[in-house]
Image (cartoon, rainbow, N blue to C red):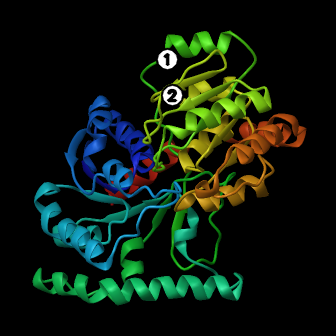
Amino acid sequence: MKVAIVINGTRGDVQPMLALAKGLIENRHEVICCAPAENEELVKRYNCQFVAFGPNYKELFKRNAQMKGGATKAPSPKEMKKETENQIDLLPELLKGSDLIIGVGFVLGVHTVADLLKVPYRLVIFYPILLGTSKTDPFVNRVLFGFGRSMTNMVMKNFINKKRVELGLQPILDVWSNWMGDNVIVACDKELNTAREGVLFKFTQTGYMTLPSQTGLPENVENFLASGKPPVFIGFGSNPVSRPEKYSHTFSEVSKATNQRLIISKGWANLSEDNTSDVLYVDEIPFELLFPRLAAIVYHGGTGTMAAAARAGIPQVAFPFMADQFENRKQIVKLGLGPNSCDFKKISASALISAINECVTNEKYKINAREISQKLQVSNGLELTIGLIENELRK
């Protein structure tokens, strides 16, 4: 059977879906992955068909990084419509012959493509907040979600329906419902962020899908780990950073003030490499091999990194920048895995120093992290998701 995966998002969206693709391929299914061009080398590394599709987020974030390191511009209605139009116009030919189409991220046109090709559509999300609110939520939360849903309809509904009518398809009543589909797959761990019953859309929660590494830790990392006490990892993933050169001084100051050795991920910001005996800068690195050997991690709050730290059983603290990262910070604090923090745009040496000191000295964080890790050892989000997909294919 042929499964098409359409991803409109960053590397954090691509990696778990690549884990799914790898599992499906091993079960003798054909998989094609449509994702932004910067992911081509990664996807092909796992012998999965790749088609470059959608915005180049790495370049987009780099161009839009603000002077305070704070935010990228939200997509305009024109940009939203253009991306949706590209999905509806271009994907049918690319995905012809698929038995199932899976969407990830901002894919408002992909359900229409599935309808045109007469195949099932499923959306995969990594944070339950997209499922909407329930009757038990605070009134203000329900109002805010309703407003966001209404605005999405105002901007996109007539545009999508015009395209659907041109294709001979029935118009949709609600953009958000059409995006969510019949049964959303929530691919994050229940132990970290449980999808609640009574929300607006039907779902099945499986768990986070970890992409296994194809390599070990680099020699310089192994040597650094062996040369002293467990270090602290700092990495901000796909977060855009203006003036990356300023961070070398900041990290040096943080290392001295906390008396902690640091491993710094250069990430999409491509931070300048300024290695010392106590600070090591690294490129892409397998978290599942590194994190169990650390004292704590400081990061942007991405769901994949959160899952890796939780499995490693170490304290963590998030400085969120966008999307799921804010919700994940709430969960870290709620579960007692680490301290609260400021947003990424307000990050400073003093904020990093305070966060690291809290993580490495508060025994409650360490105990809670170990307990969560033990619970996660018996869960397998990838296996559950593959089972769900294969059940869909057998219908």
Mark carried by residue 216:
1
Mark carried by residue 241:
none
Q: Residues within 10 Å of mark 1 (few under 14, many from 20)?
A: few
- Say which residue appears at 69% left-offset and 88% top-offset: 139
Disc 1 or 2, which lies upstream in sequence? Answer: 1
Q: Position of residue 4 (x, y in %)?
A: 26, 53
Q: Which residue is mark 2?
A: 286
Looking at the rendered structure, the kind of residue marked 2 is Pro
Q: Quadrant of the C terminus?
A: bottom left
- Say which residue appears at 31% left-offset and 83% top-offset: 156
Marks 1/2: CA distance?
Answer: 7 Å
Residue 378 at least partly seen: no
Q: Residues within 10 Å of mark 2 (few under 14, many from 20)?
A: some
- Say which residue appears at 46% left-offset and 84% top-offset: 149
Q: Is residue 86 left or right of residue 189?
A: left
Residue 269 at least partly seen: yes
Q: Position of residue 290 (x, y in %)?
A: 60, 25
Indicate whether 360 appears above or below 218. below
Q: Is residue 18 left or right of residue 67?
A: left
- Say which residue appears at 56% left-offset and 50% top-offset: 303
Pointer 1 and pointer 2: residues touching (CB < 8 Å)? yes
Indicate whether 259 appears above or below 349. above
Q: Secondary structure at mark 2?
A: loop
Looking at the rendered structure, the kind of residue marked 1 is Gly
Q: Position of residue 31 (x, y in %)?
A: 26, 44
Q: Secondary structure at mark 1?
A: loop
Indicate whether 21 appears above or below 392. above
Q: Is residue 373 left or right of residue 114?
A: right
Q: Nearer the viewer, residue 238 or 7?
A: 238
